[in-house]
Every structure is written in C-alpha cells, then in structure tokens.
Image (tube, helix red, strand yellow):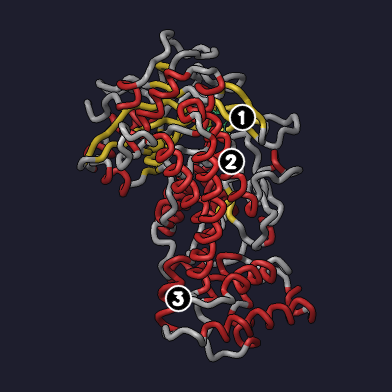
Amino acid sequence: MNIIHQDSFQSNLVADEIQDNFRRQVAGAHFSYAKPRIPSSPALLHFSPELAQTLGFGEEFTSSDDFLAIVTGAKVAEDSRPYSMCYGGHQFGHWAGQLGDGRAINLGEVSHKDKSWLLQLKGAGETPYSRSADGLAVLRSSVREHLCSEAMFHLGVPTTRSLSLCLTGDEVLRDVMYDGNPAYEKGAVVCRVSPSFIRFGNFELLSSRKDIDNLKLLVDYTIKHFYKDIDLSAENAYIQFFESVVKRTLDMIVHWQRVGFVHGVMNTDNLSILGLTIDYGPYGWLEGFDNDWTPNTTDKQNRRYRFGNQPPIALWNLYQLANALFPLINDVKPLESALDKFKSEFIIERIKMMKAKLGLVNEDTGDEDLINQIEVVLSLSECDMTIFYRLLANVDQNDNSEDALQIINEAFYIADYIKADIKSKWLNWFDSYLNRLKKQSISNEDRKIEMNKVNPKYVLRNYMSQLAIDKADNGDYNLIEELYTLLKNPYDEQPGLNKWFAKRPEWARNKVGCSMLSCSS
Ligand code: AMP
Ligand code: MG
C-alpha cells in the first residue's frame, strides 16, 4: 500500500517538533504532523472515477477496502506521514493571526504520468490548528464541496478537486444558523486533491512573525515546484513570482465572473497560491443576475464578498500577499506595478470574456458600452444569468428586438420586464446588440456554437445541491450521482436532463441551504 508517499512540501520544509494533535500556536515551522481520527463506521457515498483515473487509481483499488480506509482516515498508507499546514490570514478585512488546517490533513503525494498530486482529508478530526472547533465536517457541506469542485473543473475553472465523499458514521453537533439551536448531523470526509494547498496565508503568517528564513524557504519551494518557468537564481525571481500569482489569480476570478460563481469567503487563507478555487464553504451560484448578491449569511451586512466585489477583493488580497513578500523584495515599485497591472489586465480580460459570452467575435468601439449595459438591464428585474446567456445564443441577427426579447423570456423570474420602462431598456439594448451582430460575418449557427462553449447550460444551482443533500441525509445517493454526471458536461445539451435547465423553483427562494448559507459547516 505504498500508493501515497511523503510529498515535497514535507520533505523540503520545516516540521513542527511536537508530534501530537493538541491545539497550539506553532512557530518556526511550516506544518505539523497530525493523525487522522478513526471513523466509527466509514462508508463511501460517491467518488470521481475520472479523477481516480488521473491519479492512476485502477478500479481494483477504488473498489477495495483499502481505498475506503485511506480516504476516510481509517488507515494511513505505509509511506504516508499525514500533516496539517500552518497558515494565517486576513478574515473579512482583519488580520486573524494563526489559523492553519483546522480540519484538513494532508496524506501525502500520488504520482502518475509525470504529475504529482497531494491528497488531503477534510473533516478527519482535530489538528494543532483546530482552535475552538472540532476538526469535523458534516454531510451537507461535504456534498457541496465534492460536487462543486468537480463541477468547476468540468466548467474549465481552475480549482482543487474532490476524489471522494464518505460518511464517517459519527455524529457532529452544529448550530446551522447560529441561533442557539444546535443539532446533530452526519459526519463526513471529503478527499481533496490538488498539486498543492498552499495559500496566501502561509506566506502572511511567516512574514507577520518576521520569520524571514522560513518565508524564503516557502517562496523558494513554491517557485521551484509550481512556478517552474521562473529561474530562481534570477535577480528578480521573487518579483516574477508575485507577477505570476497576480496573473493566475486574475484568471481564476475572470472565470468565476463568467460562470456566476460566488465564493462567499474570500479571506486570504482561502486564496490558493496556485490560483485555484479552494475551500468550498458558503459559496453559491447567481440565479437572478445581481452584482450585490452573496450566499454567505455571515457576510450579509457588509456583503464584502458579493459577486461584483470579487475582482477588487482579489486585488485587496494580493496587496496582503505583496506586503507579506516585501521583506524578500525590499522594493515597493515592482510590487505596485504588478498590482496596477491586475487592474488594467482585469479590464481587458473582462471585456474579452464578456465578448465571448455575447458572441462578439470581431472588434467594435461600442463593445465596452454594450457589455456594461447588459449588466445594467439584467439587474433591472430578476433575470437568471445562466438561462439568459444560454438562450441569447438562439437569437438570429435578423430578428427584431421584440422577437429577441421573446427568445430570452424564459430567463425572467418575475414578469416585471414587461413594465414599459424596463421593457424599453431591454428593447434598446437588443437594438444595439442586433446591430452589432450585423457587423460581423460569423453565421448564427457558428456564433451559437462559440457562445455555448463559454456559457454553461448547467451549473450547480444552490437548490440542486440542497435536494441532493436532503436525499443523501435519508440514505439515497442517486441524486449525487445524477448531478455529478450532469455537471461533467455542463456545456452540452443533454436533452434527457433538461429539467435542470430551469430557474430556481419558488420554494427554494428563501429556504436555508438554497439561498443563504452560514460558515457553520
Ligand atoms: P474557512 O474560512 O471555512 O476556510 O475556515 C477558516 C479557518 O477555520 C481555517 O483555519 C479552518 O481550518 C478553520 N475551521 C473551519 N471549520 C473548522 C472545524 N470544524 N474545525 C476546526 N477548524 C475549522
Ligand atoms: Mg479555509
């Protein structure tokens, strides 16, 4: 069982000298050894065969008792020495000090076809970083993380992955709405997979402690293993590193805005240094297009992490990373210009992305205005983002604006848009859009094909996860499989599964889990 071996992070970086799971402040180290808790009655609910294949796991292994034991923490593979990472972070704009993997334990590395992946259990019990919490995860949040990680991957969004979803057989106490009504829920463990789980917060904590030697070790390690095109011996290697992190983060955020994903907790401890979407907690998907929407109840008042604020928050987080790296660079200018570049590049990349969503394939001076205006009209009444863009591909450039509005009619939740003032704005927008389409030579059919490559037909709507969770809670896991299969091909028509190409049903509008979520997972 030497499928999982120690990874480069633990062999190159500094381990905490204490080898126990008890909670503590860990100084002078990058990680602490931690033992996964033995689950009382582990059961595999679902796994991703595609990811297993990527890891080189054959069917014989994934259907074995060993597989279940390893991905639940019941057994530690021979060459694996599990550990949790030490990191800090800015939470909701404030420095929070040491956080660390409070309920995540890295098992080690799997190598296959010249690639290496780190396997990490989430919810396998207490670690030195559990602070006042229990290190456990519940079924509902684990279903959400498992399904969404894989859905995002298949949408083409940079993300960590999820290999498996298991029940532990243990009960976990949670106060879902923080209203003094705790209840027992089923405990679960997800096995996450990523080249690395290093976050902005790993660098921030070392820097805040003025532990510059360990900061340098971590930066050098990250460059050497994950930014291989940077020559570490170059004088400006650290600047190049920061510029590359800026670029990868920007790329991830543009994808989020493209598919309508709202992370919900963009604290710096939840931003991957590889620009991967990480830590699926109270995330959500836009239904009615709304720049102000956030799924996170904890953030209801300030809406710091609302959809429209994700790009500036990513930049804010990059400022914190720049501050953390400063002691190695000692020059403000190149850091500032990399941060400025985020702003200018975001404008360019957003226009590129939005043009693709609208099916605009050549250049026109009015495009920026057309793009800004569609977000304005989409916000006038509750209009489903995913359905709107998908139906927009059916518009013929020779339609008149009334016909075009009829084609996207199904995207509206309420019939508000027929109010004269709103309707006239829609008709005006369509007039401009249809005129714009006439300025390019691509056929309607080809434009539709191109648009359908960037506008998904199916996303993991919040109520869909909740339906799968409710069923799973009653022992029925079929819907997890159905959604998993559906979301493997989010851009395909999949006529047999058309029922998921639908607006959120009314019963889900204000239901817990379908509209708002708490961090209490
Ligand atoms: P999050 O914002 O959910 O990613 O978590 C913020 C911090 O809280 C991280 O350090 C997590 O490891 C920790 N944390 C969250 N939930 C738990 C839990 N149930 N037990 C221990 N630590 C947790
Ligand atoms: Mg986190």
Q: Amino acid at mark 2?
A: Met
Q: Is there any visible trace of residue 69 in the rendered image?
A: no
Q: In the image, is the residue at mark 1 within 8 Å of ligand 1 by its beta carbon?
A: no
Q: CA distance from mark 2 to mark 1?
A: 28 Å
Which part of the image, by quadrant, shows the N terminus?
Answer: top left
Q: Position of residue 493 (x, y in %)?
A: 43, 70
Residue that badge 1 annotates? 184
Residue that badge 2 annotates? 266
Q: Which mark is residue 405?
A: none
Q: Position of residue 497 (x, y in %)?
A: 46, 66
Q: Position of residue 383 (x, y in %)?
A: 66, 68
Q: Earlier in the sequence, mark 1 or mark 3?
A: 1
Horizontal relation, residue 244 to residue 501: left or right: left
Residue drawn at (63%, 72%), measured in percent from left and top? 369
Q: Quadrant of residue 418?
A: bottom right
Q: Amino acid at mark 1?
A: Tyr
Q: Position of residue 27 (x, y in %)?
A: 50, 13
Q: Earlier in the sequence, mark 3 or mark 2?
A: 2
- Which of label 3 and label 2 is nearer to you? 3
Q: Residues within 10 Å of mark 1 (few under 14, many from 20)?
A: few
- Which of label 1 and label 3 is nearer to you? 3
- Specify the quarter for ligand 2: top right
* Circles 2, 1 touching at the beta carbon (< 8 Å): no
Horizontal relation, residue 149 to residue 427: left or right: left
Q: Quadrant of residue 268?
A: top right
Which part of the image, by quadrant, shows the C terminus?
Answer: top right
